[in-house]
Image (cartoon, grey):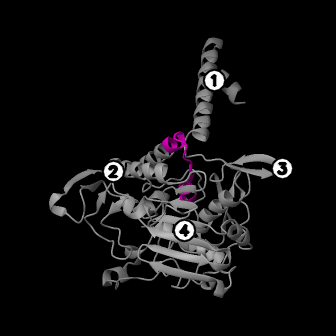
Amino acid sequence: MAKKNLEIVVGTWGIRSSFRSLIAVLITVLIITAVYLTQESGIRLVWEYRSNGLLSKCDLFSGRWVFDNETYPLYKEQQCTFMSDQLACEKFGRKDLSYQNWRWQPHQCNLPKFNATALLERLRNKRLMFVGDSLNRGQWVSMVCLLDSWISPKLKSMHNNGSLNTFKAIEFNASIDFYWAPLLVESNSDDPVNHRIPDRIVRVKAIEKHARHWTDADILVFDSYLWWRRPEMKVLWGSFESPDDAIYKEIEMLRVYEMALRTWSDWVEVHVNRTKTQMFFVSMSPTHESGEDWGGCENCYKETDVILDERYWGNDTNPKVMRVLETVLDELKGRGVNVQMLNITQLSEYRKEGHPSIYRKQWETLTEEQIANPSNYADCVHWCLPGVPDVWNEFLYAYIVHHQL
């Protein structure tokens, strides 16, 4: 019908032929572009698994959210021994709990059902470590909660040592760790408690202070984006211990981010045993701080529905940052080091209702202005648990337990 209509509008065979040629060219370009995005870019990632003895492939990250109050949530907030007050939205008064009941459904396949025992067996005598900022810490808490109820109280422990937090499944001799390094490289925001410093400074060539804690991990999960969200970053050449001899320079953020990632990638290439260690990098976790993006109010405050438009992309999410990360990971792969991106950005964009908003522990006394207008202090960055980060860990589970290497 479309072709017939085109013929009526054009009117002559010659022009119709030209149009058909143009359409053919455009289709060819689209196909080539799609193939490029699928095979070369980190935007479309393929998960390989065996089904009925056959090797199958699926883009886990392309799909939709399906309401499922029969099998989700995968655990109860109040039953997780090590739940964080920053993420315990039900505990701090949230009444609409539907954010706990959404299941991610890939278009081409089904996510493997999370099996805590299977994961613990795979982690036996191993160390799984999350490295990054508070969003990665939230994913770590999610992973601990997913496993917690399957482990006897006497056979698990939690230990905090500065930037390093360690959950131990004693029976399996398995460690699930989190290490605080919000910018991956050294910075003046490295204190795990007192890190909210307005004049943020990074040493883009210095990573050993952090990285020495990661060397012996069997599975590494990195992230770094939230703390880079500013136009420029102050870069230090020298050391924080000798400020008089140091050189400081304000540089455009994207350039500094690339420099830091290259320092990280150089360390990974040299120090990580690529035959032993699995590595992952979690893409940008989107925020929902501007309701105008989805035609809503001020921000995530009072939001209770998911976004159904699969084309939705918030203005707070910077695709240039995504491309820098993809480039660095592609270059690492070319040097024989595989770091799998967990592309959680687009699917998390749809979950504007999944943030703590005002339902979390407030670390500072609220002002009268904040109390009068709760959207002013709504947390639209982190995620309630159970919730979105559980799905990120379902991806991780699929790669650790079921992926065909």
Label 1–label 3 contact, CB within 8 A: no
Between disc 1 and disc 4, the foreground one is 4
Q: Quadrant of residue 279?
A: bottom right
| Residue that numbered label 3 is attached to | 53
Q: In this orientation, does residue 354 appear? A: no
Q: Position of residue 171 (x, y in %)?
A: 68, 78
**Residue 331: within the magenta?**
yes
Q: CA distance from mark 3 to mark 2?
A: 46 Å
Q: Point out the stretch of residues depicted in magenta.
A: 330-349
Q: Say if 292 sits above or below 39 in the image.
A: below
Q: CA distance from mark 1 to mark 3?
A: 38 Å
Q: Position of residue 111 (x, y in %)?
A: 71, 59
* Residue 256 circle label: 2
Q: CA distance from mark 1 to mark 2?
A: 42 Å
Tally the marks.
4
Amino acid at circle 2:
Val
**Residue at position x 22%, y 52% in the image:** 249
| Residue that numbered label 1 is attached to | 24
In the visual, does 23 lie left or right of 118? left
